[in-house]
Amino acid sequence: MVRSRHRRAALAAAILLVAGRAAFAAVDDDAARCRSAIALQATSFADTVLRHMITCEQGRMRAAFAADAACSDPDAAGFPANGAAVIESATSALASRIARACADVSPSELGYTACPPPCDGSASSLASFADVASCLACTVRGASSDAIVELFGTTPPVLGRSSAAERCQTRFVAASVRSYVRAVLRIRKLCQAKEDAGVTAGVDCATADATGAIAAAGARLTAAVARCSAADLALLTSCASSVAGEQSCARAAGDAMADDVFALVRPQAVTGSGCAADDFLDLSGAPGAGAGYPAPALAASCTAGEVVVTSNSIPPYTFVQTTPNALVANQATYRFPQSPVVAASTTSIPLLGVAAVAVNGLPIFGPNEAQFPDPFGDPVANAILDECLGHTAFAYHYHALRVQCLTQAGLVAEPWTLADPPSDEPSPVIGYAFDGFPIYGPYGCSDAACSTVVEHLSSWDNVGYESLDCTSSAQCSADFTCAPSMIDGAARNACVPTTYAWTNNAYRAKADARYLDQCNGHYGPGGDYHYHATSTFPYVLGCYRGTPTSNGGQP
Amino acid sequence: MRIAALVGLAAASSLLSGCAPTSGSPPPTEIRYELGWRAQGASDAASASGGWQVTNDLGYRVRVERGYVVSRSMELVECPRDARAPSAALAWLAGALGPSLAHAGHSSLQPNPAAITTPLVESLTAPRQLVAGRVAVVPQAYCRAHYLVARAERDARDLPADVDMVGKSLLLEGSYLAPGATDPVAFRVATSTANGALLDLAAPGAPPSPGSRAYDGAAGVVRVTIERDRAHLFDGIGFASASEQDVARRVLGNLIAHTRVAVVAGPRG
């Protein structure tokens, strides 16, 4: 059985077409209409290409066309001219109909970033839906070619018009596979439309068959192939020599083509459902905050284009009372976009209150306190946080993030006692900003192959410092404290003001790729935008790069 | 929540507060914060250098030869609003007139007038009862006390001359003798880690004691004593296998776990 480069390329497409977290559940109406159009056009185009390839093969077997006709390649010289013209026309129609349906959507909203090889020559980056259509056409042609070669072999015999074997090959096998592919794609299109509309949630339409319709289509294919005989198959160069074998390989060829086409309709991550909710921790085994406190509770899901996180704001680790504010359960719900988009301009994070949520469901505030005790001071520099860099006000919250406290392995009583994560491994997702972009720990890959891992650094410099390289706050003036700070792009101890953190830090862009932008984020090697937690101000977010959903923070 | 209080008489009086004293208002109450130590189980070390020693629950005999701990802040914390008012109407009034709970670091209202926030460095080798500070407040209903150990700043009281405690919350030097060992091993721990306790002035679930809600015009001074326990500082520490940071964290945790608060009200004088 030939499993060609196109199958592998389509699988690669499923990986490479991911932009951050691809939308799996509901999207907005425009995006849903766009995807539905892509699904419809892809199904129609695949059917057209298959039909004419089968017609070509049938003509070759009936000696109506030259025996060396290249029936798996519509661009080849031997392919029947009228079939080639129809496919060319269908290619143009594919592009124009997708462009019309997707006029108000950007490819990145549906997870398109780059077209994988061998179709990267047709559209290496998917910046427009013309690019998407070109990539789709190329990949569907390739998937069809694979299926045809699988079913007919590279040189099917010339058997004449009345041959039972030819009838077996073209009608009972190939045409049935074509019908099967059409049915599967239509069923998956309907499934995806429900997901996009929010009628269902969390269904993976690449594999789901809730009504059994795909199984029924497979049964029809199997029944059709059963009309072939072993004697027929013995004369053919098809994928099997027995009826049972032919039923199996025909079904497999149909599944492979349907999978390849649908992977381009809905790009997906290789693992997981693609919903950001997958990044949130399972707290069921967490030790909790200590005796007398409620157990931590967290739920995260994707619905109607949003990620919804609910938490009772209880830490999963031992609580340390560094403020006079008691730790109490505070039921909170946070919402943010499932498919974040970089906005035309940045948005400030709230000066007070919640700006993001950690993967353990606890809120993340900005890099400043309120009026008291040190007016709008830096809480990390002022050392008023516990060892997970959080504390209580009306609820427990973070001002900076520590990776050990935010992983599944860190669900122990005292995660701050765990070893620092290795600096040669990219950090995991540890939170989500309310514009939907993920927050990683400080380490990230320097290139797509992750040949090196670097620590990402804040581009915010402390501009209010009075002296450098202090070893103790005793060396600092009143209202200054000795703390690690970014000074002209270098991390150094400095006597920095205890108040007005935003005033005493300034963003200064730096050319080195390790440095982050004003919002404390960047485009990673895969083209996805995300933030990093850093060891210096602003620690998590400097601003929102996308459009945030309001979750109650005060500007 | 830990119950750690011995309440003699209550610390507060009237349910309405937050306004500047006017004629007819109750006179301000003085809150006097004191720090003390319990030492049962710890014995003074018989040496020229002084210090003290204790055997912990793992059998380690620990000797402290020099040590400091920084009491960063202490404050009485108001009762929750529904516990302060005997009726819904008064609860509303209390909320309208009374100061809100001071959510440290995030309050957009006033700081807690009952708080002492100047760090104070205490010797662990010559522990003593001392007055940490005094504040005058319009009488409130207080249900809890918060005590925080955190790093000293340059304005801390009683900074020692023999070691730099600025930026540190705890420093300990001494030696330990492991169970069955014959030679003591020196140790030194220093940390800037913070830890604190929020201590109930009444049993959990019970209303504040009658004294804490009743106005007592004769109660001029409320003495709040934060009492720590030297004897349990090293519980659970297997020195031989513990890092410096582990020892420091555990010492601070033990300090906080065995902290109690005692509140006694007395007449002016």
Image: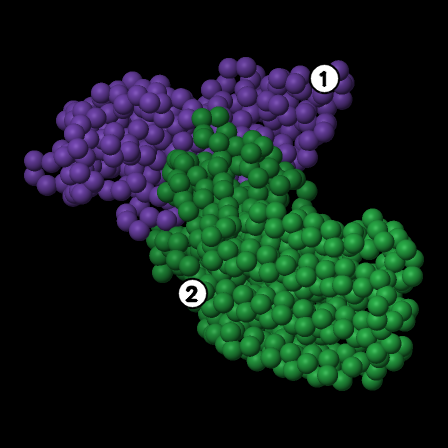
Chain colours: A green, B purple
Most extreme residue toward the left is: B23
Give yes or no for contact between labels 2 and 1 (Cβ–Cβ under 8 Å). Answer: no
Three-letter code, disc 2: Ser
Most extreme residue toward the front is: A162
Host chain of mark 1: B
Label disc, if present, on residue A365 of the rendered structure: none
Q: Quadrant of the N terminus of chain A?
A: bottom right
Is residue B81 shown left or right of residue A391?
Answer: left
Q: Quickly name the residue at label 1.
A: B179
Task: Please say whether residue A234 is visible from this viewpoint.
Answer: yes
A41 or B64, which is in the foreground?
Answer: A41
Residue drawn 58% across the image and 32% down it? A285
Q: Quickly name the residue at label 2.
A: A348
Q: Position of residue B35 (x, y in %)?
A: 41, 28
Residue count near mark 2 (Cα–Cα under 10 Å), binned few <14, some 14–19, many ≥20: some
Q: Position of residue A471 (x, y in %)?
A: 59, 53
Element marked by disc 1: loop
Residue drawn 51% across the image and 50% down it? A201
Between circles 2 and 1, the one closer to the viewer is: 2
